[in-house]
Each structure stands twice: as structure tokens, then as C-alpha cells.
Image: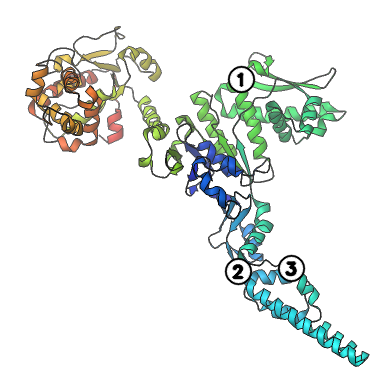
Amino acid sequence: MKPQRVRVRNYKSIDDTGWVEVDDLTCLIGKNESGKTVLMEAVSRLNPAGGDGGFTPYDDYPRRRWPDYKPRHDDDPDPVVSVEFALDRDERDRLDDRGGRAPDGTVVATKDYANDRRWEFELDESAYVDWLLSTHDVPADARRELRDAGSIAEFHATVDELRESDETADGDASEDDDTGDDDETADSDETADGDGTGGFGDVGMLADVVPDSREVAIAAVGEDVLAPALPEFHYVGEYNSLDASIDLEAFADRIEAGEQTASDRVFEALLSIADLDVESLREEDWRETLTELEAASSEVTSAVTDYWSQADDVAVRLRGVDGDSRTVEVRVENLNHGVTVEFDQRSQGFRWFFSTFCTLFALRDRDEEAVLLLDEPGLHLHAKAKREFLTFLEEEIAAEGTVVYSTHSPFMIDLDRAHRVKMIHKDPETGSTVLSDADKADAYTRFPLQNVFELGVMETMVARSQLLLVEDGTTYEYLFNVSELLEDTDAPVLDRGWTVLPIGTLENTATVRSVFDTGDKEVAIVHDGDELDGPEPPGDVTVVGIGSHALVDGDTTIEDVLSESFYLELVNRAYAAELAGASGIDDRVTSESLADVVPSGPIVERLDRYFAEHGIADGSFDRSRPATYLQRNRDEFAAEVDMDTRKAFGSLARELNRTLGAFDGDRKTGFFQSLFGG
């Protein structure tokens, strides 16, 4: 049975998630406290690997709705978790044998607050009755009549008729006894036994086991046929590390007493991989046991080194120590240097990797089907190690079963599976829910998924060598969008051979060059104003100032290579609502009204003063807002680009393109060109 969809209702912060599709590897994202953990906890209780998984209404039911639910709980318990499973051929055949039908190959199991499990599938009641008859010794005549029953209700009606017939036959036999005709009475008994009416005892036993309704019959078939095939649900919310030293006798005592420590659980997993049990640790020849553990450790170490590039020179070794008690020491050997250190002396990342691999390998190798629900795996790993761990989950664990995991990290999201990521959103009124439409998620919820694509863009950039570095995204947006607006004019535009990269501050130039491994004269920077503030960049980096191309003097920015009229039109549209709501001024900023506040200078500085003086948008002008508006509504401004903008922007583009042409070697395709087909 393989999960296809899950649904959680009436549990803690969740009212109703709706049906959520899952596959072999499903990722959940969402803000802290959005409900990711709550969702996985609830799903795990359908058939938990440990404990009874029972729901406690006064603890688990949503607090704000508890007063309304409490009076009806005993008579009408609400559902909590439902899982839709796909059946394999054998499971469908076993269900068919009992009269169950799964036309689309799926069934649904639901657990409610009474901790009862319900099943949803079709039931052929006639076939169900036939199966019941095949399992009981029923007289031939009764069997023929019961087989004609097309439903459970008809079956019970037929049983009642047979019961009445049997009682009538008993009454006639009593009257015959009064006549004293013993021979006739004996004949009558033989006839009754032969035609099935006098043999009602077996029919009566059958009637006692046949459910009273279709719903009860479905529940019985589900528990008899499907429940044994339910996968175990393993929720893992803590990722424990193995201790460097394990006292085997003390370990065995804790296991038997049910007092396992966090390390004990990892060591139990290692025992499972070695196909050993606790009793094997008490055997006299424990060195043989140690050999088996060493082999299991080698298997896990091999996987760690396959999926964690930082561990290609180490191996985990287990060493037995004799003394007052049998002890296993866990040590890590550096293969290059031939030295070993205690396990707890290695980095937290390595200990986490090895210990978690032990746990997941043990779960993977169990005979029973399993669903793993992993809460924030790899939380403390380096970004590259997160990606390697995700590959391990996909290739080793999800290949054998179903894995659902939560994350906040874009490095734990597979770009190829990004469209399948489930976003958990918590609303103050409706509680936690799962969003199928990314447009309905807020920026915080979408952020990790957005980062996945941004990282993909960055990796594409790494393959490009001719970088044009700018300080911020606003400069980037104007370089790109104004170039697009001028593409069909005779004005120069930014050459698509450039890869424009915002780097926060131009003091990061040397770092960016090292990270992207650029060669000589393959980097240029564009800075605000006429003079570059801060340290001088490396000598082979070309520097271009906006000030020499701007239409005004001062500490100019990219906005100053646009004409004042063009830029104010952009500002008026981006801030239309705030300008209309401001009191005492027109609903548009004009050159005249702006000059009344600040007559000249860089346009962004002047708008800062204007917004502050008139209390527009809480007195703060955000220069990124018009840039974003242009990005989203570029076509609206095709007719707004005037000659002054063409000349100034064209002058900047021309100088940058000359720099590009001066690079040594063949000019490579830039990021613009790679994305937009230029």
C-alpha cells in the first residue's frame, strides 16, 4: 500500500488541510509555527511505528473550537487523519476475494478522535455474503437460500425466515411427541437435519458474525484484509548522535527496561543493519558480534562517503575494549594520515551524517513497508552537505518507500521537483492549511522556493565570465528593462554579452571575482556618482561611473540617466494610491511641485525630501518600488521613453559595451542572452 494523498482535520492548528498529494519524496515548506510539524505528527498516528498513536481530544483538538465539539465527542467523534493508498495487484486480489472493490485502485483509511479506523472502498455485498458462506459449514438447503441474498440486509432477513422455519419444525416435532409415535418422530428429525431447517445451529453462528450493516462490513474487511498491509509511519523529529563509547551491558539493560537514550536509538539502528539483536551482545563470543557491527559500520561509512564529499578520507571503526564490562568504542580514522580520534571529536556535521544514515538505513531495510516523516533533516549542515543529503534521501531512501520532509532551506529543495513542493500557511482565522497555488502564499512562505530558482540563476551565472557588477537590484532592473524598451530604437542598449550581478557593495568585488573564478579583464563595475567610494578595485577591473552620463550633478544614481519627466511618470504610477490619499497636494508629482521643495539635484534625493515633507507613504520614498513597477509593467512605458532618456542611457550603454569589446579572448554569451535567446 503506497500513500497517494493525505488529509488532516481538526488537529491542533489545523482545521482542514484538504487533500494533499504525496509522492516518493515530498517537501513541505512554511514559516515557523505554520503547521509543518503538526501535519506530519497527525499523519504518523494513522499507524505509528512506536506507541499506540492515540489522539487525546482535550489536548489535540483545536482550542478555539473545543467548546463546540466537546458535547458531541462521545456520539460523533471528528476525523483527524485520512490517507489514500494505492493498492498493488495482490492487495486488490485479496480485497476482491472478500467482496471489496477498488475501481481506481485506491482506498482511504481514516482515524478519528475515538481512535477508531475507518475504511473507504466499495463493497459488493452479494460477493461478501458468498465469502462468508464459504467459511462456514452451513446445511445445503440453507446455503442455497442464503446465497440468493443480494445484500447484507437480505441475508439477515433470510436468516430470520430460516429461524422461524426451524422454530416451526421444532413445534411440529413436539406435537408428534404427544402422539407417542416414536418412529415417526425419528423420521421427522432425520428429515429436518437433511433439509437444513433442523440444522439451524450453524446458520445461527454465521448470523452472529455477519455485520448488521454495510458500513460495519466495510470496517471488518478493511481491518482483516488491509490493516495488516498498512505501512508503518515513522515520524523523526530529533536527530541524535552516537556516543563515542557504548557499555554493552548497560545498553542492553536500558533497552529491556524501555529507557533508551538518544544514542541508544542510533546504536539500535546499527544493530539492525548488522542483523543483530540485544541478546547477541550478551553472548560469550562477543568478538564475532563486534565483527558484524564493524561490517555494518563499514556499510554506513561507505554511504556517507558516497553522499558527503567532505568525508572521502575517513572511516568509522568499532573497537572492543575488555574490562569490568564489555565496551565498544567508536573511532574515526583519517585514511590519509593513519590516525584515529574518538567519534565525539569529529565535527557535528560528520557525527550527524553518520548517525542519521544509521537510523535511515535501518528503517529502509525493514521488511515492513514504511513511510518516513522527517522534520527539518540536515538543519545544521553546510549548504553543499544539505544538497548531498537530499541526493541520499532521493536515491537511497525514497527509492524504497515514501518520504515526507520539511525544510526552510533552498538547498534541501530539488529544482526538478519544485512544482511538487507543498506550502503550509497558517491563517489566524482558519488555521494551518496546505496551499496548492503559490500565488496565495505570502512572501515568507514562498521565500525558500523562490531561493531555489534564484540559486539556479546564480549557478547559470557562474558559467559566464564577463561580469558587470552593480551595487543593488534596482540598478540591475533599470539596466535590463530600459534596454528592453530601447531595443527597437536607434539608441545603444546594454550588450547581451554582459552578466549583470548585484553584489550589495562594490567592496565585495575581489570576493566575487574569487568565487566566480574570473580571469583578467573579465569584470567591470558600475558605480553611483562620479567618484568610486571605498577601496580601489583590482587593477584589471574596469570602472564606469554613472555621474558622467547623468542628466544632473551630484551623487547620482541610475535613475538620473532617465529624464525627469519619464521617471516622475513611473513614480506617479507606482505610488498612485498613496498620492491620491495624501492631503493638501495634487495626486501627481510634477517637476514644478518637486522644484518647490528641492529645485535641483539627484532625483531620488529630491523625492526623499518631497515624500517626507508631504507625509506620502509614511514620509518615506522607496526607490526600488518604481523599478519593480517598471519590471512588471514595462509595456506600458514603450511610448514614454523620450529623447533625453535615450541619449543619457545610450551614452552609459555605449561606454559599457566598449569595455565588453576590450576583453581579451572570444566574447562569451552573457546571462541576458542565455535567458532571453539573444
Q: How is the image coloured?
A: rainbow
Compared with residue 502, is residue 132 higher up or lower down, i.e. above or below? below
Left or right: 509 as drawn, with respect to 155: left
The answer to which quarter of the image holds residue 500 is top left
Give amino acid for label 1: Asp
Q: Is residue 464 visible?
A: yes
Q: Mark 2 sits on what residue?
A: 124
Q: Label 3's element?
A: helix
Choose mark 2 or mark 1, whichever is in front: 2
How crowded is the residue under tag 1: few (<14 C-alpha within 10 Å), some, or many (20+)?
A: few
What residue is drawn where x is 68% and y is 77%? 147
Give amino acid for label 2: Asp
Q: Label 2's element?
A: loop
The answer to which quarter of the image holds residue 570 is top left
Q: Report the Cα–Cα distance between label 2 and label 1.
A: 62 Å
Q: Mark 3 sits on what residue?
A: 208
Left or right: 12 as drawn, with respect to 585: right
How crowded is the residue under tag 3: few (<14 C-alpha within 10 Å), some, or many (20+)?
A: few
Q: Position of residue 665 (x, y in %)?
A: 29, 20
Q: Mark 1 sits on what residue?
A: 313
Left or right: 229 as drawn, with respect to 490: right
Name the residue nearer the viewer: 159 or 563.
Answer: 159
What residue is drawn where x is 68% and y is 41%? 51
Q: Report the Cα–Cα distance between label 3 and label 1.
A: 68 Å
Q: Position of residue 472 (x, y in %)?
A: 29, 21
Task: Tally the numbered discs.
Answer: 3
Compared with residue 299, is residue 101 higher up or lower down, i.e. above or below? below
The answer to which quarter of the image holds residue 471 is top left
Q: Earlier in the sequence, mark 2 or mark 3?
A: 2
Compared with residue 207, is residue 162 higher up or lower down, i.e. above or below? below
